[in-house]
Image: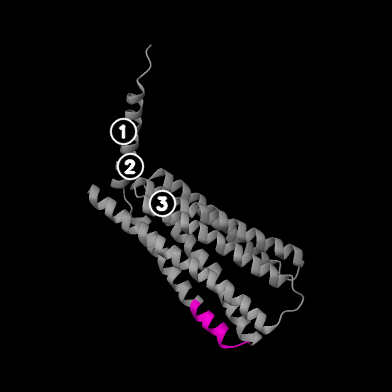
């Protein structure tokens, strides 16, 4: 039996890949696009609260207000992640297998991350500082994995639409997300390991966390907008 020529195998692979892309582009993206809008709305809301909190932190050096503002951010963060979880689950309906798989993995790790604050709250007062720090690190690690696969979801959409620009921006978003998580973790561990902290110093730490998160939220919002716009263009072209 003579093997197929390399050109024929390559042509067959390209045909199969093009068929997958055609089916994906012609499939229903309505729930996925709604999920991106859902995440975008929660992201803009979180950015607005973050900026208001930043104003509050800079307006006074008092421990009470700074603590209140940072507490607001920490309270909003689980709320934002919960909203994002709903949006990511909606993105799991994407008709492109690679995108669907990555959105599903992202949702799984995000759900796992959200269980940690529940455990920490339930065990409040019953765990030592070392365990608490471990929960903080575990939470950040799970969110980091979630964000990696969330960005890879957008990379898959860029590959489907053959758009290198979205691919590059998704990688940039991944870098910004991981940098933000690293900064937040470093600041939180610094605060937890300090036996005493001055009001002004606490305000400065609060400002660092807030600015870092607002920058990430802005980039993530832009990524959602770019991806939804590209999906609209692709589905319109196919139809």
Task: Check disc 2 and report its element: helix, strand or loop.
Answer: helix
Q: Quadrant of the N terminus?
A: top left
Task: Check disc 3 and report its element: helix, strand or loop.
Answer: helix
Q: Observer-nearest residue: 175 or 101?
A: 175
Which sits earlier in the primary sequence, circle 1 or circle 3?
A: 1
Q: Position of residue 66 (x, y in %)?
A: 61, 82
Q: Residue furthest top?
A: 1
- The residue lying at 37 percent from left, 13 percent from top is 2
Q: Is residue 188 left or right of residue 220?
A: right
Q: Is residue 127 visible?
A: no
Which sits earlier in the primary sequence, circle 1 or circle 2?
A: 1
**Mainly helix, strand or loop, the magenta region?**
helix
- The residue lying at 61 percent from left, 60 percent from top is 140
Q: Is residue 15 visible?
A: yes
The answer to which image quadrant residue 204 occupies is bottom right
- The Cα–Cα distance between marks 2 and 3, rounded to whole angstroms, is 16 Å
Is the residue 183 above or below the residue 232 in the image? below
Q: Position of residue 4 (x, y in %)?
A: 35, 19
Q: Which residue is mark 3?
A: 167
Which sits earlier in the primary sequence, circle 2 or circle 3?
A: 2
Q: Which residue is mark 2?
A: 21
- The residue lying at 68 percent from left, 62 percent from top is 135
Answer few, some or many: residues within 10 Å of disc 2's Cα (few below 14, many 20 plus, some between 14 and 19): some
Q: Which residue is mark 1?
A: 15
Please report the bounds of the magenta region as a residue range: 51-61
Is the residue 217 above or below the residue 235 in the image? below
Which one is in front in this view, the residue at disc 2 or the one at disc 3? Answer: 3
Is the residue 83 above or below the residue 48 in the image? above
């Amino acid at each position: 039996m003579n093997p197929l020529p390399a050109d024929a195998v390559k042509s067959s692979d390209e045909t199969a890949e093009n068929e997958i892309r055609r089916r994906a582009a012609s499939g229903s993206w309505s729930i996925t696009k709604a999920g991106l809008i859902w995440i975008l709305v929660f992201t803009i809301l979180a950015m607005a609260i973050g900026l208001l909190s930043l104003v509050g932190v800079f307006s006074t050096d008092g421990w009470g207000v700074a603590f209140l503002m940072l507490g607001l951010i920490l309270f909003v963060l689980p709320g934002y992640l919960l909203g994002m979880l709903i949006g990511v689950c909606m993105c799991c309906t994407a008709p492109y297998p690679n995108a669907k798989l990555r959105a599903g993995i992202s949702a799984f790790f995000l759900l796992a991350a959200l269980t940690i604050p529940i455990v920490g709250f339930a065990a409040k007062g019953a765990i030592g500082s070392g365990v608490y720090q471990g929960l903080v690190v575990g939470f950040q690690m799970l969110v980091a994995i979630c964000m990696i696969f969330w960005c890879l979801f957008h990379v898959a959409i860029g590959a489907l639409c053959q758009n290198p620009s979205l691919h590059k921006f998704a990688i940039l978003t991944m870098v910004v997300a991981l940098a933000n998580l690293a900064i937040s973790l470093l600041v939180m561990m610094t605060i937890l390991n300090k036996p005493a902290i001055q009001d002004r110093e606490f305000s400065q730490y609060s400002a660092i966390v807030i600015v870092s998160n607002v920058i990430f939220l802005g980039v993530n919002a832009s990524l959602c907008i770019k991806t939804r716009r590209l999906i609209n263009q692709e589905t319109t072209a196919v139809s």
